[in-house]
Amino acid sequence: MGQIHWESLEVVVKLRLFDALRSTDENAKRILNEFQEIDGLEEIVNGIFEMGDSEIYEKFYQAFKLEEKIWDDGTELTESEKKNQRLIQLAYKNLSKPTLRVPPLVDLIDFLSFYVMYRILEDIYYVNIGKRMSKDYKIELYFTGLDERIIFALEKFDTIKHTPSITLEFFQKIKKVDWKDKKTKKLNSKLHALSSDYFIEKRRTLDSKFTETEYAFLLYLSGCSAVNDNRDKIEEKDVIRAYRTYFKLLNTDITKLV
C-alpha cells in the first residue's frame, strides 16, 4: 500500500532535539494565551502532559518500537483478505498517494494519513492484550468495524450503538478537506510541537517516526470530524475533538469493542 519516507523529516526534527529542552510549561502558557477563546483547549494542553507522563503511553511507545514483533509469525493478511477489507480498499482507490514530485502534488489528507490509523490501533491492541498476537487478533482488529466506529463517532467510539457504513462519498469528501484558515493550522502545529517537545523532554530521545505518525493520525481524525459535520474545512473544534479521541483510545481497552 506504500511506505512513509521518514528520512526527509530527520534534518528538521533533529534541530528540535535541543530546542525541546526549553520549558514546555512556558510553551503551553503561550498557546493558552494566544488561543484563549477556543473551547476545550486547556483540557487538551493538560491532556498532552498527562499523556506524556502516563504508564500506558510509555507502553504504547514501546509497542510502536517493536514494529512487526508485536505479532506472531505468519500473521500477515493474505491478498484475498486485504481485498476484502472494504475500508482500506475504498481509501486506497480514492485518496492520493505520497509523491516525490517537487512541489509535491498531494492533498492535505492522503492515503497514508488514513492508513496510519491501523498502526496506531495495532499498538494499542497489543498493549491491551499484553503479549504477542496471533492472526485471530489481526482479523478482529481489521474486520469487526472498530475503524468505522472511530471514523464516524470519534470520541464516542465506545458508546455508539449503530455505525452506518463508511461510503465512497466519505473518502471523496475527505480528499478535499483543507484548513479553515492560517490560525487553525497554526493551532494544530503548536499542539503537535508541544506534544513532540514533551515527548523528547521526558525521554531524552528523538523518534520522529513515532511523533509524525501521531501527527498524521490526529490530522486524519480532524478531517473526519469536519466531514462528519458536513464541512470541507478543518476548524479549531475539529483539532480539539481529534485529541480527545486519541487520548480516549489510549486509555480504552479496545479489545472489548471487537
Image: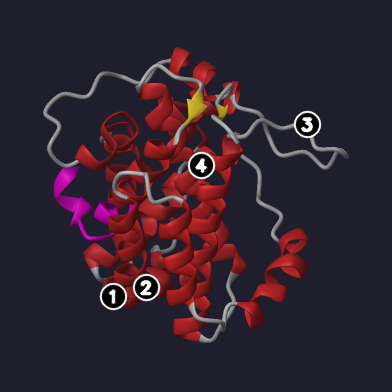
Q: What residue is at 53 percent from the left and 72 percent from the top? A: 197
Q: Is residue 2 left or right of residue 12?
A: left
Q: CA distance from mark 2 to mark 1?
A: 6 Å
Q: Please, what is the three-letter code of the amino acid marked with disc 3?
A: Leu
Which label's residue is closer to the chain start, 3 or 2? 2
Q: Identity of the amino acid at label 1?
A: Ser
Which residue lies under the disc numbered 3? Answer: 105
Look at the numbered disc 2 and give the secondary structure of its residue. Answer: helix
- Looking at the image, do the residues carrying marks 4 and 3 touch, with CB atoms under 8 Å apart? no
Q: CA distance from mark 3 to mark 2?
A: 34 Å
Q: Nearer the viewer, mark 4 or mark 2?
A: 2
Residue positioned 71% across, 39% down in the render: 98
Look at discs 4 and 3 and give the one toward the viewer: 3
Q: Secondary structure at mark 3?
A: loop
**Would you say residue 252 sits in the magenta stretch?**
yes
Q: Is residue 73 above or below residue 159?
A: below
- Residue 93 seen from this side: yes
Q: Position of residue 191 (x, y in %)?
A: 48, 57
Please report whichever mark, 1 or 4, sits nearer to the chain's N-terminal start.
1
Judging depth in this view, the residue of 64 and 54 nearest the camera is 54
Tag 4: residue type? Answer: Tyr
Which quadrant would the N terminus be assigned to in this image? top right
Q: Which mark is residue 52?
A: 2
Magenta span contains residue 56 = no
- Residue 130's place in the image compared with 39, above or below, is below
Which amino acid type corresponds to the residue marked 2 in the rendered image? Gly
* Residue that badge 4 annotates: 115
What residue range appears in magenta? 246-258
